[in-house]
Image (tube, rainbow, N blue to C red):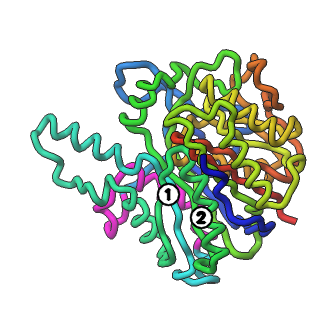
Amino acid sequence: MRGPMSDPPSPVAFPVTGFAIGNALGANVQEVVGALEESRSGLGPCPWDLPFETVCGVFRGPLEALPRSVAAYDTRLARMALAILAGLDAELARAVRRWGRDRLALVIGTSTGGILETELAYQARTVTGRLPGGFDLDRQHAFHGVLDVLRARTGATGPAYVVSTACSSSGKVLASARRLIAAGLADAVLTGGVDTLCHTTLRGFESLQALSRRACRPFSAERDGLSIGEGGAFLLVEREGEGRVLLRGVGESSDAFHMSHPHPEGLGARLAMEAALRQAGIEADSVDHVNAHGTGTVANDVVEASAIAAVLGRGALVTSTKCYTGHLLGAAGATEAVLAALAIERGFVPATLGAEPLDPRIEIDVCVKGARRPVRTAMSNSFAFGGSNVSVLFGACP
């Protein structure tokens, strides 16, 4: 088994100077926060005709066609990315003025890319015998398609790449941001992730018998699976500046225990959380809140809870926000990182909807009712197929 994959311990915190988010709760920070504070889930009926029952988190908000200059890249994924990124326009413009376009890097996570467009193209092919004339596999299906659109939108000419490690993808990009800045390769990094619903994902999780027929209920004794959603989130990390929160540490690990099952003792999860604490240079009892991976599957929730208890004890208030948005796959890490940052900024921890009755095997402090309290340090966990794990640690600005 490989050990933790984190930078050498160095208590250097980088300011997060802006973030944007969009999912089934709303198309921007204000709408998402409003739903969380009202304990209102965005999960609902799946919009597609499927041979099984499930609920989904469908992105809320208009999705405009791409500008003519990047029209060949047009996908639901790219439209969603630009719609969400609009919430960072002012911060990105300021960063470009300050650092220059060549010092702005882009690191984006996704797991589905443009699979939806490929599914639609091949569905059309079964009817007409040919692929649609506008379908471009390289620009629409491939992961770099959304990256090209974001580079065109921001004008960034610094390092740019996509991370795709399933459900940890857009958490790991924050580790990349730290490394790029620490190595002197960038002064500002736009990080985040975006994923859309698609048949491949929904049918794949159904084949694993992992989907719930109802809205997922993380940590509940009655949980029976996960819910899938779509959306995305972006964070702007800079070398220095007036931050909204501080990115204090990112811990990564790879336990490679099983393709789809977590390590039974939560070994990789523990290694990731411990590495984040070491990099931040803080003690475990300083963590006030954890936005858990919390999928609502029987195995994941027990294993993650035991790992949190082993590393942090019972002092942190733990929630899972997948009961609001669904599991956003490659966009989950960035989405839940933003929600953890918002907990610090707003002093509010959302309830874990449907968590009661709690599974008695879960010995952590699960937030079952929304709680207003000071949050100085918050952690966000993302654990992926294949044992790819990441924990992101944020702190309040002085």
When asked about the image quadrant of residue 221, the answer is top right
Residue pointed to by mark 2:
176
Magenta-tinted stretch: 66-92
Q: Is residue 241 magenta?
A: no
Point 40% across, 19% down: residue:
52
**Would you say the residues marked 1 and 2 are in contact, meaning their CB atoms lie under 8 Å apart?**
yes
Mark drawn on residue 103 = none
Q: Which residue is nearer to you in this view: 120 or 271? A: 271
**Is 13 left or right of 288, judged from the image as shown?**
left
What crowding class fits label 1: few (fewer than 14 Cα within 10 Å), some (14-19), or many (20 or more)? many
Residue drawn at x 56%, y 28% is: 226
Q: Earlier in the sequence, mark 1 or mark 2?
A: 1
Place of residue 157 in the rendered image (x, y in percent of width and height, measured from the top left):
47, 78
Q: List x then y, in percent, for residue 92.
A: 59, 71
Q: Quadrant of residue 120?
A: top left
Q: Residues within 10 Å of mark 2 (few under 14, many from 20)?
A: some
Report which residue position mark 1 lands on.
163
Query: SS at mark 2?
Result: helix
Main secondary structure found in the magenta portion = helix
- Residue 89 visible in the picture: yes
The residue sitting at 51% across, 34% down in the picture is 260
Q: Evaluate whether residue 335 shows in this view.
A: no
Residue 72 part of the magenta segment = yes
Q: Amino acid at mark 1?
A: Val
